[in-house]
Image (spheres, grey):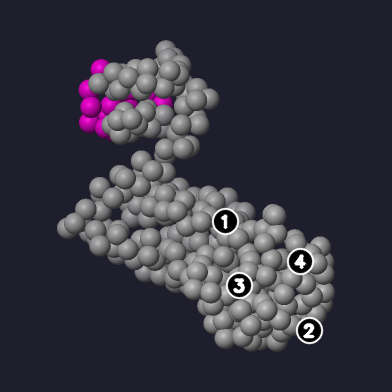
Amino acid sequence: MDLDLMRTFLEVYRAGTLTAAARSLGLAQPTVTTHLRTLERELAQQLFERLPRGVAPTAVADELAARIGPHIDALAAVARTRPGHRLARPVNLAGPVELTTVKVLPSLAPLVERGLRLRVTMGLADDLLAGLPTGRYDLVLSTVRPRTRATHAVPLTDEEFVLVANPAWAARIGDRVRVDGAAALRDVPLITYAEELPIIRRYWRSVFGHRPTASAAVVVPDLRGVLAATVAGAGVTVLPRYLCAGEFESGALVALLEPEIPPINTLYLATRAGMESTPGIAEVRAHLLMQSRLWS
């Protein structure tokens, strides 16, 4: 399907009138009309109802816009960050250290090559979200959903939690977790990033139906450290699957259980309300929304 048709459709959908869309796209209004008619003919669906002033999207248009919007925006962002282009100021991005390091920064590398200037802060969700209204950060990757009207947030990706151990511990535990549940881990050291066992507690409740009764044997305030200790044989833990994908592939870690419905946590991409279309912020936001579809 012609990309120009999709761009025209999306601009009409957002502008609400063919005249405004034509002006934004730099096209003649008859060209915009032709694009829409061609697209409707290819889809065999009506996309807009013509009104005395403007157009009203149909349910088909709503669905199509939701599906293609992030991709069209990301392509536009790439065009605006061509070689030689420089944004007016750096984009201040903040997020959890693990996701930012493993997924976000590699995903943004092409934009940096094309001129994006990026400043990154890592920390806990509540602390980082507090910096949005004050302008300290432009974009925050948050493990909790912001609830204030001053913040606009959209789901970015889901992280799946998995119970893991190195091969030696996995051999000692065997299939007992599948049979006995958490009781099979009663005497196994737990590794976590906080004394309260936050991820382990979530996993235990979701999969085993109760809170963990043991305390942590090793506490490392960084999931990458938790990963390293687990690979070394210090005990078992629960980690996001993306973080240990390489260790699964190499055999350094083993999943002790594969529940039918694994526990997940949704991460959000947050901005200050009204800043979603700001140059730089919009480019990074659109690019991450598109790239995040490839992370799982």
Residue 187 image label: 2
| Amino acid tagged 2 | Asp
Along the polypeptide, which appears first: circle 3 or circle 4?
4
Label 2: few (<14), some (14–19) or many (≥20) C-alpha neighbours in 10 Å: few
Task: Name the side, left or right, on which 176 lies relative to 145.
Answer: right
Q: CA distance from mark 3 to mark 2?
A: 18 Å
Residue under numbered circle 4? 178
Comparing labels 4 and 2, the label whose residue is closer to the camera: 4
Q: CA distance from mark 2 to mark 1?
A: 31 Å
Along the polypeptide, which appears first: circle 1 or circle 3?
1
The rendered magenta stretch, by its main secondary structure, is classed as helix
Given residues 56 and 53, the one toward you in this image is 56
Which residue is rendered at x = 45% and y = 68% of the image?
Answer: 102
Quadrant where the N terminus is found in the figure: top left
Residue 293 image label: none
Label 1: few (<14), some (14–19) or many (≥20) C-alpha neighbours in 10 Å: some
Residue under numbered circle 1? 158
Above or below — where is 5 with respect to 134?
Answer: above
Which residue is rendered at x = 53% and y = 74% of the image?
Answer: 251
Q: Give SS at disc 4.
A: helix
Q: CA distance from mark 3 to mark 4?
A: 14 Å
Q: CA distance from mark 1 to mark 3?
A: 21 Å
Q: Quadrant of residue 119?
A: bottom left
Q: Quadrant of residue 92?
A: bottom left
Q: Residue furthest top?
A: 52
Q: Give SS at disc 3.
A: strand
Task: Name the side, left or right, on which 97 lies relative to 82.
Answer: right
Q: Position of residue 17 (x, y in %)?
A: 37, 23
Task: Name the side, left or right, on which 117 lies relative to 191.
Answer: left
